[in-house]
Amino acid sequence: MAADSKWPSADRLIVFISVSLLEEEERVFSMNATTSSTHVSAATVHEFEMFHGIVLTKLVRRKLPVSLLMIETQAKEAWSEYKVNDQVILYVKHSTSPRSLKREGGIAWSFSFAADHIRRIRALSDGGNICIALVCGEKDLGKLGSMQICLLEKHHLARLLDLDSLRPQAIRVRYLPGTGKNLRARGSLSDSVEELKVPRSGFDNWRVPGT
């Protein structure tokens, strides 16, 4: 039976498919380039990337291997979630605005939590395990000695944040240089009680679930 003239030959079909795939790759590349241009330039280093990097570097340089999956919730905000070993969400926030406390003594950083943050933390807390790493930083990177990581585990959060309320809340972390091994955290639920003592080495000694 003679070949139907409406159908292309095998050689032409291969060329047609190859050209179509090439055009599709160019279209996808163009879409990605357009999308990327609307976000942050990949060549730009941002403050939150540096301070999140402190947490992630300490995490992956442990003796026991860990797996990390970044969960980008709001790309324009300087906070992110990381799923560690597929078992716990590590929620990272940073502050580079320390204040000297003349009356109480020491240095303090404040971390604000808007209604959307509280809603997200509540959902994560209800659905599984969550820890918050608060990076107490400095704009002057020469002051590394005063920078701290305050690790708050799930049982700490219940003493610091009112997850039943969507009002804006905050956690303050206080560091007393040269006075001990603890940081002191105070949140919206602890205004009238003693500050929560959190080990300064808490993150370094964190027993990561799944390791």
Image: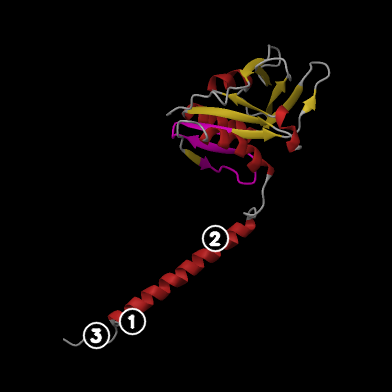
Q: Taking the image as drawn, is residue 207 in sight?
A: yes
Q: Earlier in the sequence, mark 3 or mark 1?
A: 3
Measured as percent of width and height from the top left, residue 28 is found at 50, 64
Q: Earlier in the sequence, mark 3 or mark 2?
A: 3
The residue sitting at 79% across, 16% down in the picture is 104
Measured as percent of width and height from the top left, residue 54 is found at 62, 36
Residue 52's quadrant in the figure?
Answer: top right
The amino acid marked with disc number 1 is: Arg
Q: Earlier in the sequence, mark 1 or mark 2?
A: 1
Q: Observer-nearest residue: 151 or 179?
A: 179
Q: Which mark is residue 32?
A: 2
* Mark 1 vs mark 2, CA separation in Å: 30 Å
- Tag in front: 3 or 2: 2
The amino acid marked with disc number 2 is: Asn
Q: Observer-nearest residue: 51 or 81?
A: 51
* Mark 3 vs mark 2, CA separation in Å: 40 Å
Measured as percent of width and height from the top left, residue 179 is found at 72, 15
Quarter of the N terminus within the rendering:
bottom left
Give the SS element for disc 2. Answer: helix
Residue designated by label 3? 4
The residue sitting at 63% across, 21% down in the picture is 200
Span shown in magenta: 70-91
The amino acid marked with disc number 3 is: Asp
Q: Is residue 189 magenta?
A: no
Q: Which mark is residue 12?
A: 1
Give the SS element for disc 3. Answer: loop
The residue sitting at 59% across, 24% down in the picture is 152
Residue 181's quadrant in the figure?
Answer: top right
